[in-house]
Image: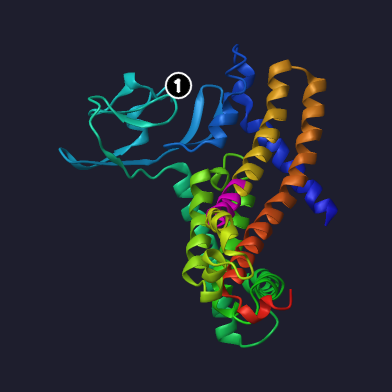
Amino acid sequence: MTRKLLALSLLLSAFMLVFANPTFASDSEEDKTSFIMHHVVDSHEWHFATFGHTHVTLPLPVIVYSGDRGLEFFKSSDFQNHETHKFGKEYAHEGYFIDDHDKLGRVDGASFTDFSITKNVVMMFIVMFLVAYLALSAANHYKKNGAVAPKGAAAILEPIVIFVRDEIAQKSIGPKYKKFVPYLITLFLFVWFGNLLGLLPGAANMTGNIAVTMVLALLTFIITNVNGNKDYWKHVFMTPGVPIPMLLIIVPVEIIGLFTKPFALMVRLFVAITAGHIVILGFIALAFIFESVTIGVVSTVMVTFINIIELLVATIQAYVFTLFSAMYIGSAVAEHAHDDHH
């Protein structure tokens, strides 16, 4: 297993160094590190690699709606220099432009709504398709063969499903866990695959986007509070055993706690994944900044080591996000009788 992780990390490291090669030819120190933020942030274009002056990219749909012009469809390539692939106001197309920070704008300053399919949105579709494909394949296997030894997709999913069900859902939620198992399994697989695919060269940093982690945390927040029983809400607004004067302090703290829990979920995943990507790409950038073979070798060794860690972090963060979601749900559905044992 260790040899496979090491081989995979070496392969990823080699690909990352090759895919980052446009910075080597640059005279600007800023340009030699600019690829880091291009990978971390979302974009209207999916940039895979640059070989010399050749950019390997996938133009993405730019969809906008405005009250005066209605719904309009463009390609991201309509708003850039076709040689350098740079965006800017000077490359405006039909009254719209994408600025240097990859933000869509309108030349006349009028308001509009952006429905564009960005790189992270495409990545979400890929992850959702992968999760759905594996789940349906596993379901068809059991439907056709019954309770037999799992093969193919079923062999991949069965240990994950059992682990999430028995070690996370049942232990964290209690007797009512079955209702929430589908959500927790889907959550784990979505975050896990998103984390792993994000480590591939040229891939999108989906789970390192705070908008994505915010929606995932919001789903947990909604499920937790919608399913909260009377004991849960009584604990929030009329904490048992607390003197009435102290409720003036305790109740606001409990209400704030309702929102800090999903906020912590959101930030934890975002920071952990983004930091890992920046560190890996930062070591890659050192090879091009110093233009030294020695630094290049050291950089490759460090990137390989960090890649091994990131493969573990990808799994750990999916586990932590799912575990804390289950714990929050468990606290909301637990019966008052359970609290008497504490």
Q: Answer above or below: position of 52 versus 133.
A: above
Q: Where is residue 36 shown, x and y percent of the image?
A: 60, 30
Answer left or right for 291 relative to 6: left
Q: Residue at x 25, y 27 (%)?
A: 109
**Element assignment for label 1:** loop
Q: Residue at x 46, y 55 (%)?
A: 125
Give the prevailing secondary structure in the magenta stretch. Answer: helix
Amino acid type, callout 1: Thr
Name the one closer to the observer, 194 or 79. Answer: 194
Q: Answer above or below: position of 12 versus 35.
A: below
Please provide the residue range marked out in magenta. 257-267
The quadrant in which residue 236 appears is bottom right
Q: Answer above or below: position of 156 versus 113.
A: below
The quadrant in which residue 277 appears is top right
Answer left or right for 105 relative to 11: left
Q: Residue at x 48, y 53 (%)?
A: 215
Q: Answer above or below: position of 328 versus 97.
A: below
Q: Where is residue 261 shown, x and y percent of the image?
A: 59, 55
